[in-house]
Image: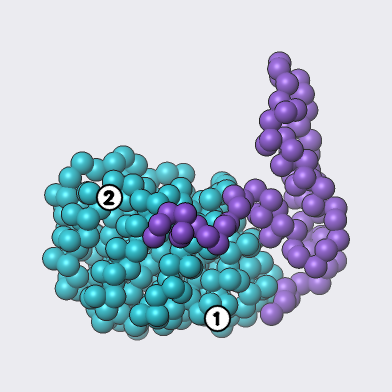
Amino acid sequence: MSIPLNSEQVLDREYLEIRGKILELAASLDRLERAAGCVNEDNRMNLISQGLQILLQETDQTKAAQIQMLFSRVYDDTWREQFEL
Amino acid sequence: MYYFDPHIHMVSRTTDDYETLAKMGCVGMSEPAFWAGFDRGSVDSFRDYFRQLTDFEPKRAAQYGIQHYTWLCINAKEAENVELSREVIKMIPEFLDKPNVLGIGEIGLNKNTKNESTIFLEHMELAIQYNQQILIHTPHLEDKYQGTRMILDMLTGDSRIDPARVLVDHVEEHTAREVLDRGFWAGMTLYPVTKCTPQRAADIIEMCGAERLLVNSAGDWGPSKPTAVPDLILEMRRRGHSEALIRKVVYDNPIEFFSQSQNFSFQHPE
Ligand SMILES: [Zn+2]
């Protein structure tokens, strides 16, 4: 099943929303810079920058699923042995 | 349009919410047992909670023409206390014959620990022993993917579990397909802030199809919107989806899933 709207209709509907979200993100990053201290070594900053890169990459996976996986803990299929369950 | 909210915590909501939901077309709901926001101290505290779920809430709902069903368990957060969990699991059968009980839930994982997994497996055993359906809570945020995979491992690792009788809730973009591909039902939870929005839920329906997919508000005591399901209905209409497709997700699917429970005696509104 696909979305009944065509891409132009989606863009018409969401352009201002996307613009607003990018602006929110920009302001958040500015706020981080204005605040005292430095969080460059914090791994969350690394995740944020990887997340931003995903938005511009072209792959066959959806961007939303890739972002979800980026912010997910790793699954290890030997967990049951580790827990002795 | 009539709809069914398959996952909503009405014990945390006011009677005014029942009225609003009824006005928006809600005619049925199922309420899984969950965390109260604080850890309860004894098995009797859970006994009282189960009385509330099986006796008081259905009456409150009925005043607004809403048919109320429920699921019983000790939630994943309190499952960290293995001793208390075992006492609760032992007590649950006292309530399984109550007319609005659909099964065991919402069991699941929270931080994906050994204790949580142990109690998950013991709840599974209880469901099998009493031939109950299961409703599952998957963890939030960074724990969701790992926890969902662990839960699927436990379920598929036991041949006595029929995936068609299990609903895995709070699926998102990275977990929905795997849950559905393995034959389970999947529920999307519409939270206003950090989790799945009506727009993203509509995207997931478009990408995965509407087969075995449900949508719920999970309205509870935290920031949440009990009327989130009508938000999805509106979003799908605005995109031009058919009424039949929307109805399948918000009404036909939950009823089809719950109909596998012997206590489900839902009456369609005239
Ligand atoms: Zn819940």
Q: Nearer the viewer, residue B63 or B217?
A: B217
User: Percent from the top left, x then y, of residue B17?
Assistant: 36, 54
Q: Residues within 10 Å of mark 1 (few under 14, many from 20)?
A: few
* Horizontal arrangement in the rendering, residue B214 relative to residue B114 (left or right): right
Q: Nearer the viewer, residue B121 or B186?
A: B121
Tell me where residue B165 sits by quadrant: bottom left
Image quadrant of residue B65?
A: bottom left
Q: Which label sits in the foreground, 1 or 2?
A: 2
Chain letter tied to purple: A
Q: Is residue A39 above or below residue B97?
A: above
Can see residue B240? Answer: yes
- Which residue is drawn at the image coordinates 32% and 57% (left, top)? B119
The chain coloured cyan in the image: B
For residue B82, the mark is 2
Please give the chain letter of the residue carrying mark 2: B
Colour logic: by chain
How many numbered marks does the figure carry?
2
Position of B258 with respect to B243 (left or right) is left
Mark 1 and mark 2: Cα distance apart in space? 36 Å
Q: Position of residue A67 (x, y in %)?
A: 70, 53
Secondary structure of the residue carrying numbered label 2: helix
Does the beta carbon of the residue at mark 1 sit less than 8 Å from ligand 1?
A: no
> What residue lies at 43% left-to-right and 49% top-to-bottom?
B113
- The amino acid marked with disc number 1 is Glu
